[in-house]
Image (spheres, rainbow, N blue to C red):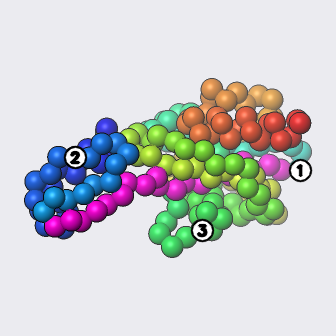
């Protein structure tokens, strides 16, 4: 269920409402309050090291518990995608990044707590900052370095990640 389905009352004046259609804004018949349901922003980085291995985590929590993923997370208010990816990789795996480069963006449906949140996921590549050694921290079961040929898109936690990994592989093997 999308978040718009929970708007049974106006958050401004409290008047009872019929929830809007999935892609329509909420429009209060009582006070005229209008709210647009937009995608949340998320980021992730495919990190590589000089020997060509790629860093992936195993997710500790649902959605996607136990599946592979590039480290990442949600963009905070007043934060750029680039700042978010640096922050998220420090929080999740304790590393610094260098040579951050944009790969692609892709929409995603993030099911959490019975609600499907639409997100727009931004993917980057980066190299490991010298002296950084990844470790499983926040919401991460384990970390590992993988040969790119051993990572199958179907092993990744979300459709957006599968799309981004395929895009990255096309860029590396034109």
Q: Which region shows up in magenta?
A: 31-49
Instruction: Return the disc, 2 or 1, that comes first in the chain's sequence.
Output: 2
Name the front one of labels 2 and 1: 2
Percent x, y for residue 92?
58, 55
Asked if residue 5 is positioned above or below residue 78 in the image, the reply reads above
> For the residue carrying disc 1, how many other residues have a C-alpha within 10 Å: few (<14), some (14-19), or many (20+)?
few
Q: Determine whether label 2 and label 1 are within 8 Å by CB.
A: no
Q: Relative to the observer, which residue lies in front, 151 or 142?
A: 151
Residue 149 position (above or below residue 14): above
Q: Residue furthest left?
A: 15
Q: Which of marks 3 and 2 is nearer the N terminus?
A: 2
Of helix, strand and loop, which one carries label 1? loop
In the rendered image, residue 80, in percent from the top left (x then y), is placed at 60, 68
At a point 58% along the width and 49% down the height, the residue shown is 121
Q: Quick check: 3 left or right of 95?
A: left
Q: In the image, residue 155 lies at what x, y percent?
A: 62, 28
Q: Distance between the residues labelled 3 and 2?
A: 32 Å
Q: How far apart are marks 2 and 1 (CA)?
A: 52 Å
**Residue carrying label 1:** 50
Circle on res. 19: 2
Q: Check if residue 43 falls in the magenta segment.
A: yes
Give whichever of discs 3 and 1 has the lower sequence position. 1
Q: Mark 3 points at which residue?
A: 80
Q: Is residue 74 left or right of residue 47?
A: left
Judge the density around disc 3: few (<14), some (14-19), many (≥20) Cα neighbours within 10 Å: few
How many discs appear?
A: 3
């Amino acid at each position: 269920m999308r978040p718009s389905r929970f708007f049974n009352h106006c958050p401004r004046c409290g008047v009872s409402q019929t929830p809007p259609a999935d892609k329509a804004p909420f429009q209060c018949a009582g006070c005229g309050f209008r709210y647009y349901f937009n995608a949340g922003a998320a980021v992730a980085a495919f990190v590589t090291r000089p020997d060509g291995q790629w860093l992936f985590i195993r997710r500790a929590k649902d959605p996607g518990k136990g599946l592979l993923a590039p480290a990442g997370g949600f963009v905070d208010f007043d934060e750029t995608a680039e700042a978010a990816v640096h922050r998220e990789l420090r929080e999740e795996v304790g590393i610094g990044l260098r040579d951050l480069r944009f790969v692609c963006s892709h929409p995603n449906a993030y099911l959490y707590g019975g609600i499907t949140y639409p997100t727009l996921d931004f993917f980057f590549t980066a190299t490991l900052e010298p002296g950084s050694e990844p470790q499983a921290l926040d919401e991460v079961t384990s970390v590992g370095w993988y040969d790119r040929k051993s990572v199958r898109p179907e092993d990744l936690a979300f459709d957006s990640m599968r799309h981004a990994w395929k895009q990255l592989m096309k860029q590396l093997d034109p």
